[in-house]
Amino acid sequence: MITKWNITIPELTGKAVRRAYVYVPDDWKEGSDVRYPVLYMFDGHNVFFDEDATYGKSWGMAKFAESNNLQLIIAAVECNHSPDNGRLSEYSPFTFDNSKLGRIKGRGHITMKWLVNTFKPYIDKHYPTLPDRKHTFIAGSSMGGLMSLYAVMRYNHVFSRAAALSPSIWFATAQLDHLLSHAPIKKDTIVYMDYGSRELGFHWNMKWQYNRVASKLLERGVMLDCRIVPNGDHDEATWEKQIPFFMNTLFYDL
């Protein structure tokens, strides 16, 4: 069962409306005492429905969950579609300069404060969640992948596991390095991270930075599942194919 409704995020876009989505296993019954882990995801419009997806192709997360009888709640929120780099700003924890785009004001820290302090409490109140850290995960791709890394490090007391698919780790490398090196994290933290082989050449420092981020995570004691996806591209079709891999990591030994 997927519920879709309109919300606002005043801290980011005032009264502008965007969509929120929640998937709950179909076999859950009202009044039941069964409760589920929760996976929070970025780019909610791309998570479930092709008709809502930016490029007409979603991840199909509900289809995967249903076909595998996955005992999991999936909560996701639509990104900012403003042509004035709205998504880039809301999904970047760091302010940075780009030769083509100019200065991008990073508001990812505001996005995460809202998700942790407003959206998560709402989901925990209205749905049958297991709200503790052990059963709270986060995932995303591209800028959402960067945000997932940021979330599991900066809000490690909230999220125990994260999946970062094709994370945008090619910019603001000094700020990201500082976060990975100094954020207080627990030793049971689990991260899945991948990158498509066909996208490794998108940025001149991509291979170097991918290796550096993986090494930093391992140095901090993170249990890391790290992959290069054969023939993987930077798109929803590739990320959909990785669902079995990252879901296995998120649920492993839970």
Image (cartoon, grey):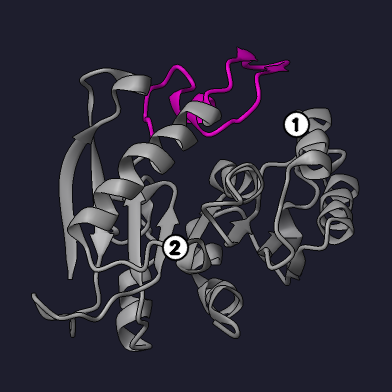
Residue 192 appears in which quarter of the rendering? Answer: bottom right
- In the picture as drawn, the residue positioned furthest to the top comes out as 102
The amino acid beneath tag 2 is Asp
Q: Residue at x 76, y 28 (%)?
A: 172
For marks 1 and 2 on the same chain, the one whose residue lies earlier in the sequence: 2
Residue 7 picture location, percent across and down: 20, 36
Q: Residue at 54%, 29% (x, y): give it.
A: 109
Image depth: mark 1 or mark 2 in front = 2
Question: In the image, what residue occupies the spot 84% across and 42% down?
Answer: 181
Provide the residue span drawn in magenta. 79-107
Q: Which residue is mark 1?
A: 171
Relative side of 1 to 254, left or right: left
The label on residue 185 is none
Label 1: which secondary element: loop
Amino acid type assigned to the residue bearing label 1 in the image: Phe
Task: Work out whether 247 lies above or below 237.
Answer: below
Instruction: Give the quadrant of the C terminus.
Output: bottom right
Query: Visible in this render: residue 51?
Result: no
Looking at the rendered image, the quarter that the N terminus falls into is bottom left
Most foreground residue, 49 or 56: 49
Q: Give the vertical position of 105 relative to 39 (above or below).
A: above
Q: Is residue 102 magenta?
A: yes
Task: State the image quarter where residue 93 is shown.
Answer: top right
Instruction: Determine the CA span between mark 1 and mark 2.
Output: 32 Å
Taking the image as shown, residue 209 lies to the left or right of residue 78, namely right
Residue annotated with mark 2? 132
Residue at 19 percent of width and 64 percent of height = 2
Q: Is residue 37 visible?
A: yes
